[in-house]
Image: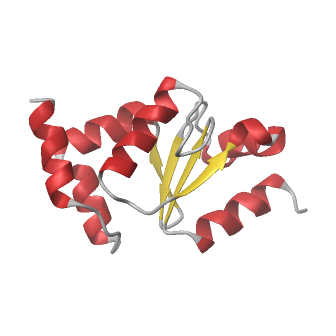
Amino acid sequence: MSDPKTQIEETNKANDVVLYMKGTKTMPQCGFSSRVAGVLNYMGVEFMDVNVLSDDGIRQGIKDYSDWPTIPQLYVKGEFVGGCDIITEMTLSGELDTLFEQNGVTYDKDAAEKIREANA
């Protein structure tokens, strides 16, 4: 196929929401990936999951691409949003809702509220 940077760029262009993670959205293989995938799944967000454990080039390539040392990494409309801690904070503050709304990403607002209520 192509080099990791090109693959990453093409994946991010072709999908509104992409999560580079360890494992898959249905079977995460680390707690941090599980938390972010769980939030997105619970909120009903359609997203592309990229299992970095299945491709060492992508695993290192995504870190180089974003200049961010850890996985998972969330991208919305091709823009790097953050990792687990940032996504958790954005979910609890409502910033993630705003980001999705500004970018036309469909999500369940009631589910987002339930997450915040459960963590209040």
The residue under the point 64% across, 50% down is 50
Is residue 60 visible to us here?
A: no
| Direction from residue 61 to residue 115 in the image, left or right | left
The residue under the point 66% across, 39% down is 63
Residue farthest to the top? 31
Give the quadrant of residue 67: top right
Can you give x and y, in whole percent of width and height, for residue 59 in the image? 73, 39
Q: How is the image coloured?
A: secondary structure
The residue under the point 49% across, 49% down is 74
Can you give x and y, in whole percent of width and height, for residue 8 in the image? 70, 58
| Most foreground residue, 96 or 29 | 29
Can you give x and y, in whole percent of width and height, for residue 109 in the image? 17, 59
The residue under the point 15% across, 29% down is 119
Query: Is 116 rendered above or below residue 2?
Result: above
Is residue 47 visible to us here?
A: yes
Residue farthest to the right? 1
| Most foreground residue, 62 or 19 | 19
The quadrant in which the N terminus is found is bottom right
Across the whole image, how many numbered discs are drawn on residues? 0
Can you give x and y, in whole percent of width and height, for residue 16 in the image? 49, 68
| Direction from residue 26 to residue 22 in the image, left or right | right
Query: Is 42 rendered above or below residue 83?
Result: below
| Most foreground residue, 39 or 13 | 39
The quadrant in which the C terminus is found is top left
